[in-house]
Image (cartoon, rainbow, N blue to C red):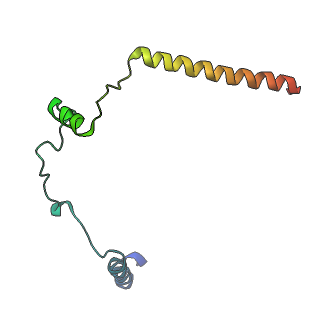
Amino acid sequence: MNSIKNSPKFNSIVKELVSSLYNKKLKEITTTASIDAYETPLAFKNKGLSRKKKKNIEKQTGYKFVDEALSNDDIKKIKKQIRKEVSDILFDIWIKRNSWGGK
């Protein structure tokens, strides 16, 4: 049996369709080979700004940097407050549902 996929006519039709789509859709192809290297020596520096840079920025802008890290105590307080608010909402829903006579 000769499969349609293996026939020369099918292969030529597929090649024509691919080339027409290629010409219509792909006007430009960019590869990573054409990208320039990073020109900053600290492009991937893991640490934040140095003290000197922070001080310079503070002088220029008039603002000061603030340490905004949350401590474990802060996270516990936030979780406790969220639980309280959610429980109040659920209690209000329960009261209203019972007052409606719903089941």
Question: Residue 76 or 8: which is nearer the viewer?
Answer: 76
The N terminus, quarter of image: bottom left
The C terminus, quarter of image: top right
Question: Residue 72 or 34: which is nearer the viewer?
Answer: 72
Q: Residue sitting at 65 percent across and 20 percent down?
A: 87
Where is residue 2? Give x, y as percent: 40, 78
Within the image, what quadrant is residue 64 found in?
top left
Q: Is residue 59 above or below residue 33?
A: above
Q: Is residue 15 above or below residue 86?
A: below
The residue positioned farthest toward the right in the image shown: 101
Question: Residue 95 or 35: which is nearer the viewer?
Answer: 95
Question: Residue 28 or 11: which is nearer the viewer?
Answer: 28
Where is residue 35? Give x, y as percent: 17, 60
Where is residue 49? Give x, y as percent: 20, 34
Q: Residue sitting at 17 percent across and 32 percent down?
A: 50
Q: Is residue 3 visible?
A: no
Q: Residue sitting at 24 percent across and 34 percent down?
A: 58
